[in-house]
Amino acid sequence: MSLLKIVNLTKKFDDVVAVDGIDLDVADGEFVTLLGPSGCGKTTTLRTIAGFYYPDGGEVYFGDTLVNNVPPNRRNTAMCFQSYALFPHMSVWDNICFGLKMQKIPVDQQKQRVSKVLEMMGLQRLENRKPGQLSGGQQQRVALARAIVTEPEILLFDEPLSNLDAKLRVQVRVEIREMQKRLGITTIYVTHDQDEALAISDRIVVMNDGRIEQIGNPYEIYRNPLTSFVAGFIGLANIFEGTIVKRENTRYTVEAPFGTVVIDGEGKAEPDSSGTLKFSWRPEEMKVRADNGVNRIRGTILHTVFMGNTTDLFFEVNGFRMRAQTDEVDVVRSGDTIEFTVPENAFSILRG
Amino acid sequence: MSAIIETQAGTPLHVRQAKRKKQFYILLTAFFVAVQIIWVGIPIFMAVMWSLVDPANPWSFPDILPQSFSFEPWKFVFRYTNIVRALRTSYTVAPLAVLLSFVLSLPTAYVLGRKRVPGRKFFMLIVLLPIIMPGMVVALFLSRVFAGIGLSQTFFGLVLAHTLMGMPYMVRVLTTSFASIPQDVIDAAENLGAGTWVKIREIFLPMIRPGLLAGMIFAFVTSIEEFNLTFVIGTPTYETIPTILFSFMGYNFIRTNASVVALIMMAPNIVMLFIVERFLKSDYLAASLGKM
């Protein structure tokens, strides 16, 4: 049974449609990430789940219960805000205890549960501090502690890591994931950071312009994007469109602007009946100076960017720009003409 | 290289600049302190001197200090005026006016601070009207209204009049306080299960406390010093310290007695200001550390 069910949810602000009829089922204990650029409706969806916004259309169910008109304080969710939203006039202890007081938990149990969560988050010695006396990372932990101590049905995250520096971000996201797995809390996580989404989620919901572009596990989303938006938004991609000139089962020969490629579409989306095919592949799938392979692409290197573990190659094929990645640092220089190969099964077939 | 930057004296330019800047700040501070002393210190000193002048031995030019001191002016004021009753009236009216203006300002400030009301800026200006308009003008016309509804010469009418003068400060300060509370914090409280009353008691009230204290000081001091409305609406039934003070400044001008009343009026205000300052300081500290 799904723990959270969203049916045809629509939310408008004045004339702007923020969420445009989305459907989503989330299983008990699942970690689902809403991923998309700013203004895609991900935060609106999250806030509607929390109850801060009431839907203009569609339904939100917690289990079997329709919660459309249930105010936020009567919903058993707990939210971690981007700004942390700690109560500045309360100590760390009082911040964490707030939700338990609201639930009218007996005082001795309050103490027990707060102590436990303080220990779990490594905040034992900070319990008497005010939020202003804590570092960003510590504030983040207090916010997390305040949310999980209430043992909510659904844990909600609104870009919780965007105020932390890069290293801490990676560390805290691992902590969040481990904690979520240990406690088994159903979690909805909003971010615009694709790395974060790929690293942390059971499933990713890619949103754009108030609609869902694709739902899938991180591997599917990365390996097999269904739309050019998903291909372009998550990771890097070369996206082209061509005419199908030959088809054997799921093997397509496509004449693209830069040349002819053979695409193995097994397990991929069906191309539509128009005879054209939109496809993409990842830069890291391109092999430099491989000896065999069907899809040979000859291009001139425009420039290279050394990234440490890989080198980005920007090159041009018949006037079309592409991108490749190689881990062989000293292979190429700008101005070189070089031959790449792309494996037949490395392509994704896109719907739009 | 360093030879180019350093002067003949051997002090680097940036060090000399920093020194000059520091000297400038010290000069500015000294100037400010000097102005404060002339503006505030000297009048207070003069008031103390005048209140101790011996009537038998007047203080006149070119004496820098009175020839002899006595408590005669103090004795006179306490013996022949209603100063004690006026003190009692002043210090019962003021807290009541503060309380009433707080209660009346709270909803207005909440709406102006947190809701998107059309004409918000206009209302903020309207609220200030009682302090912009000359007190005598307000007093003249308000007294007519008060007389019409039977509030003239009543204690409640006096409290109401003082409330009116305190409210502009209260509304303005509380509006700013309400506006500075991040919506996320309110949402977080609600998300954790807080209903309306809990939000007011646990979040809004503690978070507007610094502003509330500031508003209370303004309203309290305004009430203690209020003359115009009190004179028209309250006297002769109710006298406050300022009405007694003004009685010494009319045609029967007596500087010694006026000084005594002025000191009586001033002293508690100054003491209170220091006390509340302490509270305010620690509160603002907490607020700023809380990164509101």
Image: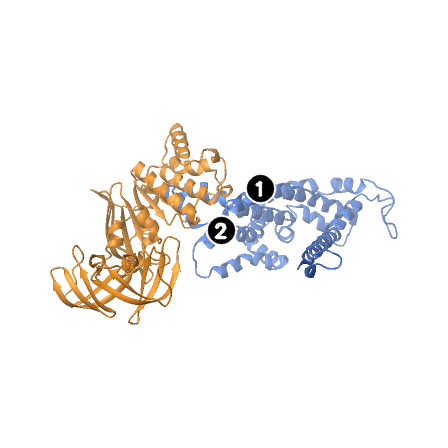
Q: Give residue A150's position: percent from left, percent from top.
A: 35, 37
Tag count? 2
Could you say which disc has been placed on residue B282 in the image?
1
Q: Is residue B26 visible?
A: yes
**SS for dot 2:** loop
Give the alpha-carbon distance from disc 1 to disc 2, as whole Å.
18 Å
How is the rendered protein coloured?
by chain
Amino acid under disc 2? Ser
In which quadrant of the rendered view does residue B86 lie? top right
Q: Which chain is blue?
A: B
In the displayed structure, A297 sits above or below A106; it is below
Q: Give residue A303's position: percent from left, percent from top.
A: 38, 65
Residue density around tag 1, few if under 14, some if 14–19, many if 20 or more, within 10 Å? few
**SS for dot 1:** helix
In the displayed structure, B241 sits above or below A223; it is above
Answer left or right for B251 relative to B290: right
Marks 1 and 2 share the same chain? yes
Amino acid under disc 1? Ser
Chain where mark 1 sits? B
In what quadrant of the picture does the C terminus of chain A appear? bottom left
In what quadrant of the picture does the N terminus of chain A appear? top left
Q: Which residue is mark 2?
A: B180
Q: Give residue A339's position: percent from left, percent from top.
A: 28, 64
Could you say which disc has been placed on residue A288 in the image?
none
Q: Give residue A31's position: percent from left, percent from top.
A: 29, 44
Q: Which chain is orange?
A: A
Q: Residue at x 46, y 38 (%)?
A: A92
Q: Residue furthest front?
A: A291
In which quadrant of the rendered view does residue B77 lie? top right
Q: Earlier in the sequence, mark 1 or mark 2?
A: 2
Q: Pick the residue in front: B167 or B24.
A: B24
